[in-house]
Image (cartoon, helix red, strand yellow):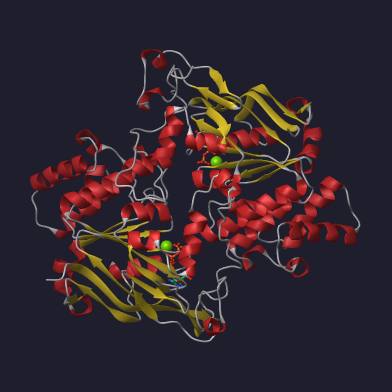
Amino acid sequence: MSDVILEGRDLKKYYPVTKGLLQRTIGWVRAIDGISFTIERGKTLSLVGESGAGKTTAAKAVLLLERLTSGEILFEDRDIYKFSKSQMKAEYRPRVQSVQQNPWSSMNPRMRVRDIIAEPLVVNTKQTKEQIRKRVLELLEQVGLAPNQADYYPHEFSGGQRQRIAVARALALNPSLVVLDEPVSALDVSIRAQIMNLLKDLQNQFNLSYLVIAHNLATVRFMSHSVAIMYLGQIVEYGDAEELFQHPLHPYTRALISASMLTLPEDAEQGVEQIILKGEMPSPLNPPPGCRFHTRCSETQDICSKEVPEMKEYGKQHVRCHHVVYR
Amino acid sequence: MSEIVLKVEDLHTSFFTRSGEFRAVDGVSFHVREAETFGLVGESACGKTVTGLSILRLLPEPAGKIVSGKITLDGTNILELSKKEMRAYRGAMISMILQDPMTSLNPVYTVGNQIAEPVRQHQRIQDKNMVEEKVISALRLLRIPAPERRLQDYPFQMSGGMRQRVVGSIAMSCYPRLLIADEPTTALDATIQAQYIALFKDVQKETDVAIIFITHDFGVVANMCHRVGVMYAGKIVETAATSTIFKAPRHPYTNALIHSVPRLDRKDDRLYSIEGQPPSLLNLPPGCRFAPRCPDVMDICNEQQPQEVEISEGHSVSCWKVK
Ligand SMILES: Nc1ncnc2c1ncn2[C@@H]1O[C@H](COP(=O)(O)OP(=O)(O)OP(=O)(O)O)[C@@H](O)[C@H]1O
Ligand SMILES: Nc1ncnc2c1ncn2[C@@H]1O[C@H](COP(=O)(O)OP(=O)(O)OP(=O)(O)O)[C@@H](O)[C@H]1O
Ligand SMILES: [Mg+2]
Ligand SMILES: [Mg+2]
């Protein structure tokens, strides 16, 4: 049996760009434009890319917060768009939960932590008050908070503690897949490590699958089993995380790794050079023809501006580039 | 070695509020030389921005006050300058790139007008053509393509990276001796951030400007700074050359910070992590501020504040464990 929990096939989401009083559509933002990926049970897939790449749009599609323009999402081999309303409510929504980037804005300040964590249980289950009370205490313990903190309000917690509360809430219904949109980027450095370790521990303990959205590559290497690098709505490189970080094949992946690498002054003196990309990110309203990356690529050739490169397989990797050097 | 541009000695800055005195900066000392970048690194609320604002004497009034200390710029103690003299210093001698990118550009003025203002005010140039020439050369210094055509643009017409270059042009338009850059790259994407840092290194080579680079990102520190001061709860706990900070940190807090950041050049299974969080400034521990979280804590750490010790040339640490 395949151990894939969720698969996205050729997902597209086009947002209309409108103008004037009549809201006439004058174009489309291709926020995601034909992306495919699989998430394995108990494993982490990360979507990485710079601002506007389409990461959040992909995550929203999985969480059913956006209706796709086209494409299929298979959950445990079943097409979720063919689910009935009641199947959706019983078999999909509770099993796919999320943790938002900002632990400050994602919580009602007037609710006690106990009620914030209990909310999904109250809405989705028929558990008794006593069962819910017990479950909340269990969840608090699992995320490293003390039982007496259940009666506090969100403002009485630090950013890291609030993110723990958000994780506890996401785990309340025993989900199989958790979508984590920039789970640590709003936190302080010394707190990030605590949360990242916690997320890993919980994954091992409950065999959780994660879809992580992140722009920090080092965080991604720490968290992920597989990685998809996104650029302007497309995946340009996809595959095994370690393979990707050790042998990046797409020029954009290489530039991104180089830009995020810690280069000490003496490394620079010894000739470790950073790849500095030219130009800016083009508008997703009007992406460049051919390979979308060709306007910033240092290795661009004639064909790159003319033909759209197909996604091709190289060992464990999938790359969308006309001139991959692979041995 | 090149000349010292700025020297900060035992700076204390507090906010006096109804709930008490917040000692945001509590005895900070460091210096920056010509053509040198000094990194001020630390977690949220440790006092980095307040240190920068103190040097500019731009603290939010009336709550914020410099309580004591000495700030010397090219030999002049700027804390003794009158408000009017200080105004002349700002812009001409020191400028700052503010942390909040939304406040640094005015959305209703063109880019050209926003750079022209400090040129007129601080360089006292009124001639229209000369002002325009200065504005264009400031845009060119920050490698803004086709600067002549950018003058009439509004900030919203530019990408985040270009806007941040305009902010840099404004700060550099009068060729200051000292530039305080407060998290200028935090909102930028990785590849744009790399462009910006490379650019600032070039600008520094061309102008010899001394830079205080405020950040919480150790990757940025490594790529940009010659020397670093690590701040914790209002104090600098360790100062050293960048590579020393990374390779031989001596303060347990510096050590923890460096080892808790995941690495891109290897696969870690677990991150080093310190429990707890920084103390409240209203309720500081009597001894070392890091003692409640320190893995190496001793009795004396909870009782008395450690003094700064220079353990080798240019490497100072405030920790009871380090002699
Ligand atoms: N509701 C919307 N209407 C129109 N365009 C949208 C909408 N949501 C997103 N977009 C556009 O789709 C593109 C992809 O956006 P998305 O938020 O998925 O990017 P992202 O990779 O998450 O970026 P970031 O790192 O900035 O969060 C962007 O160009 C964005 O402006
Ligand atoms: N106007 C103010 N009134 C009262 N307290 C203030 C004020 N401005 C700053 N503080 C306090 O001073 C301390 C230092 O703040 P500062 O802005 O220097 O932190 P920082 O190191 O720049 O943090 P960040 O990385 O979040 O920008 C904080 O505890 C902050 O709450
Ligand atoms: Mg996003
Ligand atoms: Mg600040």
Q: Position of residue B288 (x, y in %)?
A: 45, 20
Instruction: Give B142 or B239, whichever is nearer the viewer.
Output: B239
In the rendered image, residue B233, in percent from the top left (x then y), is placed at 48, 29
Residue at image position (52%, 81%) is A304
Give the side of residue A286 with respect to residue A193, left or right: right
What residue do we see at 43% from left, 19% from top? B321
In the depicted structure, whether residue B198 falls above or below residue A149: below
Q: Residue A82: name its quadrant.
A: bottom left
Question: Visible in this render: residue A28?
Answer: yes
Up/down of B218 relative to B229, above or below: below
| Placement of the N terminus of chain B among the 4 image quadrants | top right
Residue at (41, 48) in percent of width and height? B263
Image position of A148 (left or right of B21): left
Decide: is B313 above or below A216.
above
Expressed as whole percent of the image width and height from the top left, the position of residue B103 reads 62, 51
Q: Could one spot residue B106 in this view of the protein?
A: no
